[in-house]
Structures are given as C-alpha cells and as structure tokens.
C-alpha cells in the first residue's frame, strides 16, 4: 500500500475539515495538541507557519474553521479553535530567537511596500527570510493599518500588533509612484487597504453632524477625536462594522442602541459571534 500523501491539500480536505476550511490551512489539530501539552510557544510558532499574526487572528478571525469542526456533529458547539490561538499567543514565551531571520547576505533585490497594514507586514515577513530588502512606507505614525485604527481596541489591543523588525518608515505617505520606482526599488507592493465606508446618499444625509459613516467614526474613536455619543443611537446595517459601532456606542455612554436591517436575521452579514457579543454587551 502506498503511503498516504500529505504533501498537497487534498488529504486535509478529506480528513481534517477544520484545517481545510481555514483559508490559511492552519494545522489546527496539531496546535491544539501542543496547547494541551502546555507547549504554548510551539503552538504559536506552528500557527505562524500558516498565518503571521496568531495573536491577532485569535481575537478577530472570522473563524470559518469552526463551522467545519467535527465536534459540532456530536456536541452543541465546535472546539473554540479561534480563541485557542489567542491562548497560545498570550501564554507564549519570547519568540524573537525562533522567528525566521534575514540571511547574512541580501539577494540584492529591494522591495518597497506601501502601507503598514497586515498585507504589507505579511509580505515582508515572507520576503525578508529569502534575502529581500524590504522597506515599508506608512502614512501614519504607527504600523498596523485598520487593525490599529478601526478594529476597536477592546477587541484587538494595539499591544498584540507584533514588532516585525522590518525597515519601517513611519509618517511617510507615498505621494508619487514614479518617484518610488526611480528610487532603485525592484518592485513595489501596494498594501494601502480599502478603508472606505459605503456612503448612504439619502435626503438629509448631510443635514446634521450627528450622522456618521461607521468606518470613519470608529477611526475617530481610535485617534481620540470622538469620546462621547448621544443617548439614543441608531445603526443602519448589520455587518461586523455595525456590531463594532454598537459596542463602541455602548462604551461611549449610549443607553439605547438599535440596529436597523433590511432583511431578517438569517440574512445578517455579521458573524454569529459578533452578533452574540454585541447583544450580550447590550444586556449588561
Ligand atoms: C471596523 C472594522 C472591523 C474589522 N474587523 C475585522 C475582524 O474582526 N477580523 C478581520 O479579519 N478583519 C476585520 N476587518 C478588516 C481588516 O481590518 C482589513 O481586512 C485589513 O486591515 C486589511 O489590511 P491591509 O493591510 O490590506 O490594509 P489596511 O489595514 O487598511 O492598511 C493600509 C495601510 O496603508 C496606509 N496607507 C494608505 N495610503 C498610503 C500611502 N499613500 N502611503 C503610505 N501609507 C499609506 C494606511 O495608513 C494603512 O496603515 C475590519 C475592518 C473594519 C473597518
Ligand atoms: S481561527 Fe482563523 S486562522 Fe485560525 S484556524 Fe480558524 S480560520 Fe484559520
């Protein structure tokens, strides 16, 4: 009999449903086994082979692995795969010595990365060990992109955003692509994100300063420009950003937070756990 082929994804498709359902094909069973043995650092590093930010995903991943978990066929709920990633991250030891290092000699190629969000940081993480020189240009004075400026800090504390040890040029917005190319870079990676909320062009939209677009409003909270909100808040839309707005409103002092949806609950865009967390917070 031929040995089982585990080098492709096909094998996992058939036997490890959660690993297949994870977009990064994280080795879920193995990292949970390592946690069970108390080997948090090893569990973290195993995660890191598939995804660069286990501490962040352990808090905010949309966790498509969990609906696929086979335990939910015999129990009410799946294994808490996502939160266990957080457990590995929060309990790990110093891993700096075990992270992939830049080789002694550069391969002579320089890459410019525009924006210091998770996209550019992940690209740098993969290219630096191959000998590429990576320079990240970030418009803001801190790295992290939307992870820092939009996902509320009560869900994702900024301390979880890891120092990747890359050449990071902060407060340097890239304003001219041709200037970048002239600056001796072999390639440019554009990781500037998609940080815009959808406008709602309805009569009255611009008649009041009490109407906000969710993404910008959350960003204003992160920057400390918004510190309060009225007592009664209406949120239009039921996606994950809307849930962040609900929870942030409650934390800024709102007493009555309502959500308006066009379709029944089964069609809500927000993940079940985002809805649960927001509803739980409202009940408190
Ligand atoms: C409210 C909210 C909640 C979210 N919650 C989740 C969640 O729970 N789970 C999840 O997985 N995802 C979540 N997301 C989505 C997630 O934040 C994004 O998918 C992710 O941040 C995209 O990463 P990125 O690196 O592509 O871009 P970004 O994070 O947007 O980073 C882009 C960076 O580029 C910089 N930049 C832009 N233009 C320039 C320029 N010209 N020069 C230099 N720098 C520039 C910006 O300042 C920014 O730092 C959420 C998003 C929002 C808005
Ligand atoms: S929590 Fe996210 S990253 Fe982790 S295994 Fe599940 S889908 Fe993959």
Image (spheres, rainbow, N blue to C red):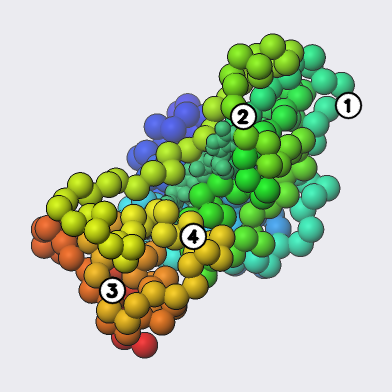
Query: Residue drawn 62% across and 40% down?
Result: 139
Which type of secondary structure does the marked residue at label 3 adopt? strand
Q: CA distance from mark 4 to mark 1?
A: 43 Å
Q: Which residue is mark 1?
A: 104
Q: CA distance from mark 4 to mark 2?
A: 22 Å
Q: Which of the two labelled residues, at mark 4 and mark 1, occupies the earlier sequence position?
A: 1
Give the quadrant of residue 40.
bottom right
| Rendered-image quadrant of the C terminus | bottom left
Give 224 or 20, whichever is nearer the viewer.
Answer: 224
Q: Is residue 3 left or right of residue 241?
A: right
Disc 4: CA contacts within 10 A as few (<14), some (14-19) or many (>=20): some
User: Mark 1 and mark 2 in contact (Cβ < 8 Å)?
Assistant: no
Q: Which residue is mark 2?
A: 174
Please state the horizontal and vertical placement of residue 52, each as a whole percent of the image. Answer: 61, 44
Q: Which of the two labelled residues, at mark 3 and mark 1, occupies the earlier sequence position?
A: 1
Give the quadrant of residue 94.
bottom right
Which type of secondary structure does the marked residue at label 4 adopt? helix
Please state the horizontal and vertical placement of residue 46, each as a whole percent of the image. Answer: 63, 48
Q: Which residue is mark 3?
A: 233
Q: Which residue is mark 4?
A: 220
Disc 1: CA contacts within 10 A as few (<14), some (14-19) or many (>=20): few
Q: Which of the two labelled residues, at mark 4 and mark 2, occupies the earlier sequence position?
A: 2
| Rendered-image quadrant of the N terminus | top left
């Amino acid at each position: 009999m031929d040995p089982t082929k585990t080098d492709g994804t096909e094998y996992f498709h058939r036997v490890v449903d959660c690993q297949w359902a994870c977009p990064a094909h994280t080795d879920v069973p193995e990292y949970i086994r390592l946690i069970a043995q108390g080997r948090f650092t090893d569990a973290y590093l195993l995660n890191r082979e598939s995804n660069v930010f286990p501490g962040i995903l352990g808090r905010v991943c949309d966790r498509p692995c969990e609906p696929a978990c086979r335990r939910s066929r015999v129990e009410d709920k799946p294994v808490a795969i996502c939160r266990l990633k957080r457990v590995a991250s929060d309990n790990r030891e110093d891993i700096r010595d075990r992270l992939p290092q830049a080789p002694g000699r550069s391969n002579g190629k320089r890459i410019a990365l525009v924006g210091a969000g998770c996209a550019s940081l992940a690209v740098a993480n993969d290219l630096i060990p191959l000998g590429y020189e990576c320079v990240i240009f970030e418009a803001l004075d801190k790295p992290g992109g939307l992870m820092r400026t939009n996902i509320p800090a009560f869900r994702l504390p900024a301390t979880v955003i890891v120092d990747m040890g890359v050449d990071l040029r902060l407060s340097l917005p890239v304003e001219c692509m041709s200037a970048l190319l002239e600056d001796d870079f072999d390639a440019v990676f554009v990781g500037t994100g998609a940080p815009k909320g959808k406008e709602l062009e309805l009569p009255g939209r611009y008649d009041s300063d009490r109407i906000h677009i969710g993404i910008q409003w959350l960003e204003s909270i992160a920057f400390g420009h918004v510190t309060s909100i009225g007592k009664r808040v209406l949120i239009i839309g039921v996606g994950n950003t809307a849930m962040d707005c609900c929870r942030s409103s409650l934390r800024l002092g709102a007493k009555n937070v309502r959500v308006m949806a066009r379709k029944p609950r089964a069609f809500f865009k927000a993940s079940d756990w985002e809805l649960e967390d927001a509803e739980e917070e409202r009940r408190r």
